[in-house]
Amino acid sequence: MSSKRLVIVGGGISGLAAAYYAEKQFPEMNITLLEAEGRLGGKVATYRDEGLTIERGPDSYVARKHVLTDLIEEIGLGEQLVRNNTSQAYILDARGLHPIPKGAVMGIPTDLELFAETSLLTEEEKAEVTERLLHPAPDLTIPETDIPLGEYLRPRLGDALVEKLIEPLLSGIYAGDIDRMSTFATYPQFVANEQKAGSLFEGMRLMRPLDQQQGPTLKATGQFLSLATGLESLVERLEEVLERTEIRLETPLRSIEREEDGRYRLETDHGPEYADDILLTIPHRQVVSLLPDATLPGLANLSTHSTATVTLIFDKETALPIDGTGFIVNRRAPYSITACTAIDQKWNHAAPNHTVLRAFIGRPGKDALVRESDEMIERVVLEDLENICGRPLHPERVVISRLLDGLPAYTVGHAQRIQEVREIVASHYPHIHLAGLAYDGVGLPDCVAGVKATLEQMALQQPEPCKES
């Protein structure tokens, strides 16, 4: 009998990691990876030129999410891991730049003496935050069902801190409005640590990096990891180490039909493919169109928004009045950009001979600028940065990268809806599985963890091999 065949659709980080783990999980299975574009990596791409190593997509991942570090070390890239520098970052509002309070974890204060120094809030607002942290309202209860993140945080911290610090820090990661975002699907650690420690304040103190917990004697360490050779080298190495996976580029999938024998026929631009199992790591709207027999409102109604990064490269002698790693923009500030990173300050490896700013545009519901011409985007971003810096700027090069409709919004009830989606797909299309940004998290480690969990579930569905009597 011929070996069973797994077809992975999508050659981004989710699809590549799936192929890597599938080779280990299913040593007897034939594996094919289909990618519609002419390159692998999806959103992961690195600009490399004249000593520059600058990410066009995600530039790092949270170090405490070890699943990606484990994968990087397994494939021999561990020596390339680098941590970000820990100099000051800022919040930009209509009044100007304000240092993000030291000792804050995801915007929530864990050291009230350091928090008292912030210029973001008035003295009255800081007093309110301190009172709420130290003496939570007696009627506060830990939610048992999903609620908006803003609804969870506001009674515990006050509106001022949520609007001025936490919203800019957290909403961009999950591409959402903090008053619509799912608490359980985006930041479940808030609830878990409050339950563990008895209050949100004490719970967040448990999450502090080791250097903050043990006082000023330890040197602060960056909480993000990247690769000195660029994150695209992760894509390149995964492709190198795959031993049994047949990769087919420029092979978009047009339809999926189930044959009478239970296998699936996948129509592509280059003819049919056949599979016993299919793992779809493509955008959720494509999943909806490919599986017409399953009604999937949880995916069809999942909103997205578009973003773009605008990298401005200056000569090394150009000094910019941003003393730190960058800033995040309050949504009520009069700017189009949402954040800006001083790449040469944040990463030692990225631009040793240049000064580099990487600006971001595209808010939920306000992302029309992303679809404008490069010239328009460059003009708007330069105007914002010149107003912030107080003088004209003359970059040597500008590199613009777009992510159109790429960031799904995890609104209240997201986890339950995704569970229902998977159950519906399983009932209408047995042995078709879903993984990627739309489901279990938007960061690189979340994508890797998602495909690992999916493959483990697949293994449980495989029939036991016949044993000789």
Image (cartoon, rainbow, N blue to C red):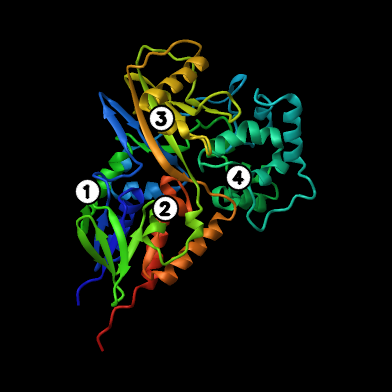
Q: Which residue is mark 3?
A: 372
Q: Which residue is mark 4?
A: 206
| Amino acid type, callout 3 | Glu
In the rendered structure, find residue 260 and report the number of the disc placed on it.
none
Task: Determine whether the residue tagged by mark 3 lies in a helix, strand or loop.
Answer: loop
* Residue 147 placement (x, y as % from top left): 64, 51
How far is the residue under mark 4 from the one under mark 1?
A: 40 Å
Circle nearer the viewer, 4 or 2: 2
Q: Which residue is mark 2?
A: 285
Q: Is residue 61 left or right of residue 231?
A: right
Q: Nearer the viewer, residue 372 or 40?
A: 372
Circle nearer the viewer, 4 or 1: 1
Circle nearer the viewer, 4 or 3: 3
In terms of sequence position, does the residue under pointer 3 or pointer 1 come before the other? Answer: 1
Q: Are marks 2 and 3 in contact (CB under 8 Å)?
A: no
Residue ID at (36%, 69%): 431
| Amino acid type, callout 4 | Leu
In terms of sequence position, does the residue under pointer 4 or pointer 3 come before the other? Answer: 4
